[in-house]
Image (cartoon, grey):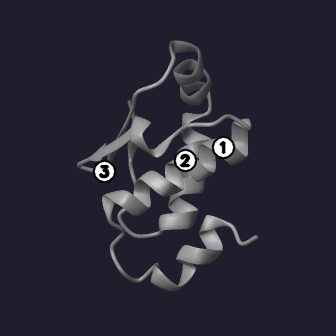
Amino acid sequence: MKSLADLLSKYNKIVPTDSLKKSAVVEVIDRMFDLKLEKKDVSVSNNIIFLKCSTKLKAEIFMHKTEILRNLNDILVKNSPKDIR
Protein backbone atom coordinates (compact mmCIF):
# COMPACT_ATOMS: atom_id res chain seq x y z
CA MET A 1 0.00 0.00 0.00
CA LYS A 2 1.33 3.40 -0.95
CA SER A 3 1.82 6.01 1.74
CA LEU A 4 0.15 9.37 1.58
CA ALA A 5 3.47 10.99 0.71
CA ASP A 6 3.76 8.81 -2.40
CA LEU A 7 0.21 9.57 -3.46
CA LEU A 8 0.65 13.31 -3.00
CA SER A 9 4.14 13.58 -4.48
CA LYS A 10 2.96 14.40 -8.01
CA TYR A 11 0.77 17.20 -6.65
CA ASN A 12 3.49 18.97 -4.66
CA LYS A 13 3.60 21.82 -7.16
CA ILE A 14 -0.06 22.59 -6.48
CA VAL A 15 -0.92 24.40 -3.26
CA PRO A 16 -2.47 21.76 -0.98
CA THR A 17 -6.09 22.16 0.06
CA ASP A 18 -7.22 21.99 3.67
CA SER A 19 -8.58 18.50 2.99
CA LEU A 20 -5.15 17.31 1.84
CA LYS A 21 -3.57 18.94 4.89
CA LYS A 22 -6.03 17.14 7.18
CA SER A 23 -5.25 13.82 5.51
CA ALA A 24 -1.53 14.43 5.87
CA VAL A 25 -1.90 15.32 9.57
CA VAL A 26 -3.90 12.15 10.26
CA GLU A 27 -1.38 10.03 8.31
CA VAL A 28 1.67 11.48 10.11
CA ILE A 29 0.14 11.17 13.58
CA ASP A 30 -1.08 7.63 12.92
CA ARG A 31 2.35 6.63 11.65
CA MET A 32 4.27 8.25 14.51
CA PHE A 33 2.07 7.25 17.45
CA ASP A 34 0.09 4.28 16.14
CA LEU A 35 -3.06 6.06 17.29
CA LYS A 36 -6.28 6.61 15.44
CA LEU A 37 -7.02 10.26 14.87
CA GLU A 38 -9.98 10.90 12.60
CA LYS A 39 -10.09 13.53 9.89
CA LYS A 40 -13.13 15.13 11.55
CA ASP A 41 -10.97 15.85 14.63
CA VAL A 42 -8.58 18.01 12.62
CA SER A 43 -9.23 21.48 11.26
CA VAL A 44 -6.86 23.80 9.41
CA SER A 45 -7.12 27.56 9.32
CA ASN A 46 -4.44 30.00 8.14
CA ASN A 47 -1.86 27.15 8.09
CA ILE A 48 -2.51 26.34 11.74
CA ILE A 49 -3.70 22.87 12.74
CA PHE A 50 -6.41 22.70 15.39
CA LEU A 51 -7.03 19.34 17.09
CA LYS A 52 -10.17 18.12 18.83
CA CYS A 53 -8.99 15.12 20.81
CA SER A 54 -8.28 13.94 24.33
CA THR A 55 -5.92 15.91 26.55
CA LYS A 56 -3.60 12.90 26.75
CA LEU A 57 -3.29 12.66 22.97
CA LYS A 58 -2.80 16.42 22.63
CA ALA A 59 -0.01 16.35 25.21
CA GLU A 60 1.74 13.55 23.31
CA ILE A 61 1.36 15.42 20.03
CA PHE A 62 2.66 18.69 21.50
CA MET A 63 5.75 16.92 22.87
CA HIS A 64 6.60 15.90 19.29
CA LYS A 65 5.28 19.03 17.61
CA THR A 66 8.48 19.98 15.74
CA GLU A 67 8.92 16.45 14.39
CA ILE A 68 5.29 16.33 13.23
CA LEU A 69 5.60 19.71 11.51
CA ARG A 70 8.86 18.60 9.86
CA ASN A 71 7.16 15.45 8.52
CA LEU A 72 4.23 17.52 7.25
CA ASN A 73 6.64 19.88 5.52
CA ASP A 74 8.27 16.89 3.79
CA ILE A 75 4.89 15.66 2.56
CA LEU A 76 3.19 18.95 1.65
CA VAL A 77 6.30 20.99 0.68
CA LYS A 78 4.44 24.16 -0.31
CA ASN A 79 2.18 25.95 2.13
CA SER A 80 2.56 23.35 4.89
CA PRO A 81 1.07 24.03 8.36
CA LYS A 82 3.24 26.15 10.66
CA ASP A 83 1.72 25.38 14.06
CA ILE A 84 -0.40 22.90 15.99
CA ARG A 85 -2.91 23.96 18.62
Q: Position of residue 82 (x, y in %)?
A: 38, 47
* 13 relative to 47 in the view: left or right: right
Residue at which label 1 appears? 30
Structural crowding at the residue carrying mark 1, measured as other residues with C-alpha within 10 Å and reported as few (<14), some (14–19) or many (≥20): some
Determine the residue located farthest toward the left in the rendered image.
46
The quarter of the picture where residue 50 lies is: top left
In this rendering, the answer to whether 18 lies above or below 5 is above
The quarter of the picture where residue 80 lies is: bottom left
Residue at which label 2 appears? 26
Query: Mark 3 and mark 1: span between their CA atoms?
Result: 20 Å
Identity of the residue drawn at 40% across and 27% down: 52
* Tags 1 and 2 touching, CB below 8 Å: yes
Of residues 17 and 59, which is closer to you in this image? 17
What secondary structure is found at the residue carrying circle 2? helix
Nearer the camera: disc 3 or disc 2:
2
Q: How many marks?
A: 3
Identity of the residue drawn at 40% across and 70% down: 78
In this rendering, the answer to whether 17 lies above or below 13 is above
Looking at numbered disc 1 in the image, what kind of residue is underneath it?
Asp
Quadrant assignment for the N terminus: bottom right
Query: Mark 3 and mark 2: span between their CA atoms?
Result: 15 Å
- Sequence-first tag of 3 and 2: 2
* 32 relative to 52 in the view: left or right: right
Looking at numbered disc 3 in the image, what kind of residue is underneath it?
Asn
- Sequence-first tag of 3 and 1: 1
What secondary structure is found at the residue carrying circle 3? loop
Instruction: Find residue 47 and name its label.
Output: 3
Q: Position of residue 31 (x, y in %)?
A: 71, 47
Looking at numbered disc 2 in the image, what kind of residue is underneath it?
Val
Of residues 17 and 13, which is closer to you in this image? 17
Quadrant assignment for the C terminus: top left
